[in-house]
């Protein structure tokens, strides 16, 4: 078997609707300045869709006072403005045509109504509305609202079957083999090229990690790295890959009944790691207790049956899975404070929901951590994010708000409850923290500074994106193992 993923299924390079002046070099330290307020004139120009003028304002303000406390904030905003024009690049009228070509019986006015209701993420650029290029994929999730449009393929059937099997036998185990590849295309024959690929890392559910094959001259980070990678320093157009195998054991727990909770306490591992102060801390610029986060946390606390960490985490999971809808997102660098964005708009994807759940848990005093990497099911493999939270007497548990929301949308309460406390065994853990640094410093801002699921590449000090570097992950083998046998 070989199942592969090389990018978003509906993403296309449509070109930017306008050209924003190239920004200065930025780094990950600049990203941390996103929590600072922007000068109001920059905000107004950006929100009106005047991206060139907003970038010029950033440039002028930096030149006026390069040592200003806002210089880093202005640099990262200028960088975001330059990328924004190519992120939202699908004219709304063209999306309407694509919908009709896909069989949807909708008018331009009905497409605008979908945008008004938030089903389509739209920005005004240069006076015209533009959507994300994979907006059609989002609408397939809500095909009932777009008559004639074929629904997104139902992926819940195999999750339901696995959930019931785990409940019957107590859990599920798999041995999974993955190959990750990154091919650098946009490089001269003498250009220095740096490549980082994600590799499965140590995690509570992961064991028996093996690196089976690797391109030569690689540096492999420790299994305990927060963002585990294998990296290369090479020259010119080049392709590098790594193949690894690991075992994942996913226990089943019922956290919705007193009997199930007691069984989870009895089965708790004595060697489970305790939470650290970092698991309760704010982390700028995103995992912060803003006034909106605190307000929602108060509502969550009021809905909880008691003040125990388990009940508070359950109430936070209920809130996110019942008040947020799935929508494909722009790159996260375009989002300001991610939990505020999610709670205010009512939309998010797996990473946005995970960050929101972590922040709510920490605000409520429940330790919570990030996990991310790949969802590697028998017939698909793709990037994915989820969460761990800590309950005294039981230990670390899992929550997948994104899959919980999918189950809630389908009206499957049993499956929604499963993803609070449990995970399927179809996971590759590569990252154990949000915004985790690589083992060695990178020369420029990563394509995705917050997560690492498909790899990063740099040529002559610049970040390679789009067609400049081709990224692929392949599920080579999945072996089903008997639960409880080692």
Image (cartoon, rainbow, N blue to C red):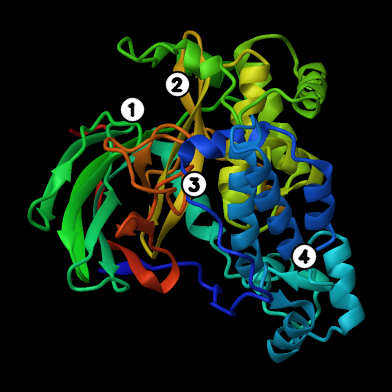
Is residue 181 depicted above or below 37 in this figure? Answer: below
Q: Earlier in the sequence, mark 1 or mark 3?
A: 3
Instruction: Please tell me how many numbered marks the rendered image carries.
Output: 4
User: How many C-alpha atoms fall within 10 Å of the one at disc 3: few (<14), some, or many (≥20)?
Assistant: some
Q: Nearer the viewer, mark 2 or mark 3?
A: 3
Which residue does the numbered mark 4 point to in the structure image?
122
Report, in whole angstroms, how far the alpha carbon at label 1 lies from the one at label 3.
Answer: 35 Å
> Regarding mark 2 in the picture, which secondary structure is present there?
strand
Q: Earlier in the sequence, mark 2 or mark 4?
A: 4
Verify CB contact (< 8 Å) between mark 4 and mark 3: no
In the image, which disc is placed on residue 204?
1
Q: Nearer the viewer, mark 4 or mark 1?
A: 4
Which residue does the numbered mark 2 point to in the structure image?
396
Residue depicted at 79% across the width and 64% down the height = 50
User: How many C-alpha atoms fall within 10 Å of the one at disc 2: few (<14), some, or many (≥20)?
Assistant: many
Q: Nearer the viewer, mark 2 or mark 4?
A: 4
Direction from residue 72 to residue 454 in the image, left or right: left
Q: Earlier in the sequence, mark 4 or mark 1?
A: 4
Q: Which residue is farthest left?
A: 216
């Amino acid at each position: 078997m070989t199942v592969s993923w090389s990018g978003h299924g509906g993403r296309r390079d449509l070109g930017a609707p306008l050209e924003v002046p190239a920004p200065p070099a930025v780094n990950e330290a600049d990203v941390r300045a996103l929590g600072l307020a922007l000068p109001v004139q920059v905000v107004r120009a950006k929100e009106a869709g005047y991206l060139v003028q907003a970038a010029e304002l950033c440039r002028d303000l930096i030149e006026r006072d390069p040592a200003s406390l806002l210089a880093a904030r202005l640099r990262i905003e200028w960088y975001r403005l330059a990328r924004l024009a190519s992120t939202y690049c699908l004219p709304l009228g063209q999306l309407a045509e694509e919908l009709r070509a896909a069989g949807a019986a909708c008018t331009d006015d009905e497409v605008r109504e979908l945008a008004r209701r938030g089903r389509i993420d739209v920005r005004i650029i240069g006076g015209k509305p533009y959507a994300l290029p994979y907006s059609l994929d989002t609408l397939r999730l809500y095909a009932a609202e777009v008559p004639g449009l074929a629904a997104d393929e139902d992926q819940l059937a195999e999750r339901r079957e696995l959930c019931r099997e785990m409940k019957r036998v107590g859990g599920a185990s798999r041995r999974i083999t993955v190959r990750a590849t990154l091919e650098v295309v946009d490089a001269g024959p003498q250009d220095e090229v740096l490549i980082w690929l994600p590799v499965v890392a140590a995690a509570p559910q992961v064991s028996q990690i093996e690196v089976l094959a690797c391109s030569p001259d690689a540096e492999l980070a420790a299994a305990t790295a927060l963002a585990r990678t294998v990296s290369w320093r090479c020259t010119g157009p080049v392709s590098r890959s790594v193949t690894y195998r690991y075992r994942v054991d996913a226990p089943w727990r019922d956290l919705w009944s007193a009997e199930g909770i007691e069984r989870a306490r009895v089965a708790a591992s004595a060697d489970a790691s305790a939470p650290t102060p970092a698991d309760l801390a704010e982390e700028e610029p995103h995992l912060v207790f803003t006034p909106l986060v605190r307000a929602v946390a108060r509502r969550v606390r009021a809905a909880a049956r008691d003040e125990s960490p388990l009940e508070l985490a359950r109430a936070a999971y209920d809130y996110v899975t019942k008040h947020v809808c799935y929508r494909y997102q722009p790159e996260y660098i375009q989002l300001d404070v991610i939990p505020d964005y999610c709670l205010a708009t009512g939309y998010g994807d797996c990473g946005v929901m995970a960050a929101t759940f972590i922040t709510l848990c920490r605000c409520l005093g429940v330790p919570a951590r990030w996990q991310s990497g790949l969802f590697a099911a028998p017939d698909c493999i793709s990037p994915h994010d989820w969460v761990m939270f800590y309950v005294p007497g039981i230990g670390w548990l899992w929550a997948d708000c994104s899959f919980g929301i999918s189950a809630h949308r389908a009206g499957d309460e049993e499956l929604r409850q499963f993803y609070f406390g449990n995970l399927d065994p179809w996971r590759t853990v590569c990252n154990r923290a949000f915004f985790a640094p690589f083992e060695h410093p990178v020369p420029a801002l990563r394509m995705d500074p917050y997560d690492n699921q498909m790899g990063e590449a740099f040529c002559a000090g610049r970040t390679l994106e789009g067609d400049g570097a081709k990224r692929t992950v392949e599920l080579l083998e999945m072996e089903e193992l008997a639960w409880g046998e080692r």
